[in-house]
Image: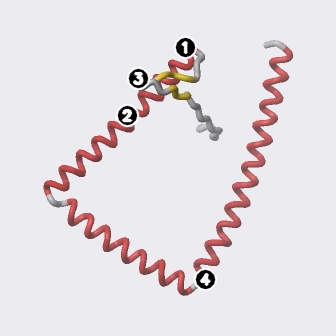
Amino acid sequence: MSESKYESISRLENLINGHQMDLDKLQSGLKDQAAMLNAAFENDAAYLEAHKDMQEATKKKKVEKDRIIKEPAIASLNAKVQDIRSQVKEEKQALSDYLTQYFQESGLRQITGTDGEIREIVTSVRLVKKRE
């Protein structure tokens, strides 16, 4: 590895680590502020009453939804919806894999669709702790 490439990578590592530290600090501050905000809600009697009413309504809604979903025609429709959702998820993953391969092989970040529209390939990366 050349010296300039090593220096560039080293600078990037420092930038990444600095931003990760800043992000950790922001997330910690957010956690504290959100806890104080939640405490304010939990100490308000009107809010607690409204929250209790909402929980009861949510339970009633679930009971009614479960009742409706037991009807054979609705159960069949629900199964179809779940199946289509699963297919959509699989198609999105396949498309993502093909786009990654297309980008790696062509170096291009755009592709023209069958409708003539030019679409841009967008990548998203995250930094996560390594699992042991």
Amino acid type of the residue that numbered disc 4 sits on in the rendered structure: Asn
Dot 2: what SS? helix
The one of 13 and 122 positioned closer to us in this rendering = 122
Image mark for residue 43? 4
Q: Does residue 96 lie above or below 24 as drawn?
A: above
Image mark for residue 70? none
Drawn side of residue 67 relative to residue 56, left or right: left
Amino acid type of the residue that numbered disc 2 sits on in the rendered structure: Glu
State the CA–CA distance, disc 1 to disc 2: 23 Å
Q: Nearer the viewer, mark 1 or mark 3?
A: 3
Drawn side of residue 17 relative to residue 125, left or right: right
Percent across and percent down for residue 131 are 59, 38
Residue that appears at 21% across and 63% down: 68
Residue that appears at 79% across and 25% down: 9
- Binning the other alpha carbons within 10 Å of mark 2 as few (below 14), some (14 to 19) or many (20 upward) gives few
State the CA–CA distance, disc 1 to disc 4: 58 Å
Q: Nearer the viewer, mark 2 or mark 4?
A: 2
The residue carrying mark 2 is 90
Q: Earlier in the sequence, mark 2 or mark 3?
A: 2
Image mark for residue 105? 1
Tell me the quarter of the picture where residue 8 sits: top right
Q: Earlier in the sequence, mark 4 or mark 3?
A: 4
